Amino acid sequence: MNIQHYKHSTKRILVLGSGGREHALAWKFARDIGWKNVFTAPGNGGIPNSHLLNIQDFKAVKDFCEWQQIGMIFVGPEQPLAEGIVDYFKSTDIQIIGPDKQAAKLEASKIFAKKFMQKYGVSTASFHVFNHTADAKNLIAEKQGNLVIKFDGLAGGKGVFVCSSVAEAQEVLQKLEQSYGKNVPFIIEDKIQGDEVSVIAFTDGRSIKTLQPSQDHKQLYEGDTGPNTGGMGAYCPVDLAPEIMADINKNIIAPTLKGIQTEEMHYKGVIYFGIMVKDGKSYLLEYNVRFGDPETEVLLPALKTSLWDIGKACLQGNLSEITMTFNPGYFVDVVLVSGGYPGRYEKGKLINGLKDVNDDIIVFHAGTKSENGQILTNGGRVLNVVAHAGTLEQARSKAYEAVEKIKFDRMYFRKDIGMRKNYELKMDN
Ligand code: GLY
């Protein structure tokens, strides 16, 4: 057989990344094409077929794919996309799902994204662009510090600051100065206080197909208090009023697609709309050019359609022919974290009880490693405990029952995942 042809036709995929999101991606692909055909790099202690590989080294990723005869790559995190991994693989025989470097600026540059939204009429908060911290003084005073400051570049979820006073806004700018100097690009935008929803979708550049609306819980403590984290839990579907979904489609998704087409972006992958809903109107807070974490850990178990088929349709430009179907009921993910996270925490704690969890619970690993047949903690976010049931309340109870069986030293989790009232999203109050 011709090697070139074999590579193209091979049903083997490499998932890049190491978190719960990547475990969920690998798990979903494995349901379609079997675990022996799903590779993950660098992966973690719970993902079968994990391979230690520096995924920022694109040549090393290519060599690995050639060695293992892998024909397709799915990129989990934003960093390799922002650094041009899709552009790198364009000239190879290996297909890769994701936006190229230019399209990835929708996440990598907040200024690029806001200008794109403005140009194509995507509903979003009013904003001002600054290139020097001193220039923002008047606006901060005028808004009495009630505003949002967004650092322009990728900041691992730590680049957005919601302020409520002049002192708070000034403190944020001081921190920006300390890290990047006074000549730093940033945005100040109006603060819209409503309910947030994540709408995550696929695009082939010609159409956009959405998954179920979901919601993550970013803050560390119950009641959405305390410091921001990578995400303490998620659930789906969010019960969105049909009028709100229609507004999102009309004023956010459709103009975004128009922009992608008009700009002739190479975008064959995931697009994430982080949305705020207030008084029946939706506003796009941000794009991400990859799956959300922990939203993926509920969205993929809920998705019935083959992820392999969706990925191929994105690459082939026939996504419009795919029908998205979903398992009925609700999915809840409770994230178990290391004590001290998102600040300093210890690693290497033995995780007990994983085998005691019922078979109908999925545990997606994040910061774990496997050593001598034992699973040890190896990060801040350690495990995602995912339950499915007919109602949200039942799914929550099942998830928390499973959580009780898992133990590691200084384990912490939020007890109110999936309990938000979401008045703005339901429109029935
Ligand atoms: N859950 C938010 C994010 O992945 O950025």
Image (cartoon, rainbow, N blue to C red):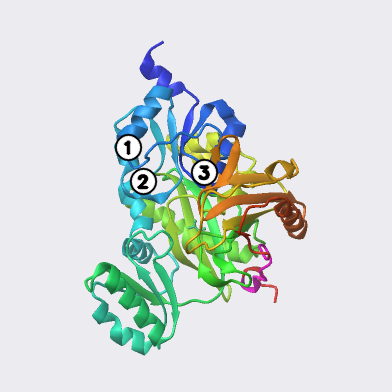
> What residue does disc 3 label?
22
> What residue does disc 1 label?
58
**Mark 2 → mark 1, Cα distance in angstroms:** 9 Å
**Mark 1 → mark 3, Cα distance in angstroms:** 18 Å
Q: At 39% across and 75% down in the image, what residue appears? A: 189
Q: Position of residue 406 (x, y in %)?
A: 69, 50
Magenta part of the protein: which range?
A: 416-424
Contact, mark 1 vs mark 3 (Cβ under 8 Å): no
Query: What SS does tag 3 mark?
Result: helix
Q: Earlier in the sequence, mark 2 or mark 1?
A: 1
Dot 1 surroundings within 10 Å: few (below 14), some, or many (20 or more)? Answer: some
425 relative to 292 in the view: left or right: right
Q: Position of residue 277 (x, y in %)?
A: 55, 70
User: In which quarter of the view is residue 175 placed?
Assistant: bottom left
What amino acid is labelled 2 in the image? Pro
User: In which quarter of the view is residue 322 placed?
Assistant: top right
Residue 210's place in the image compared with 89, above or below, is below
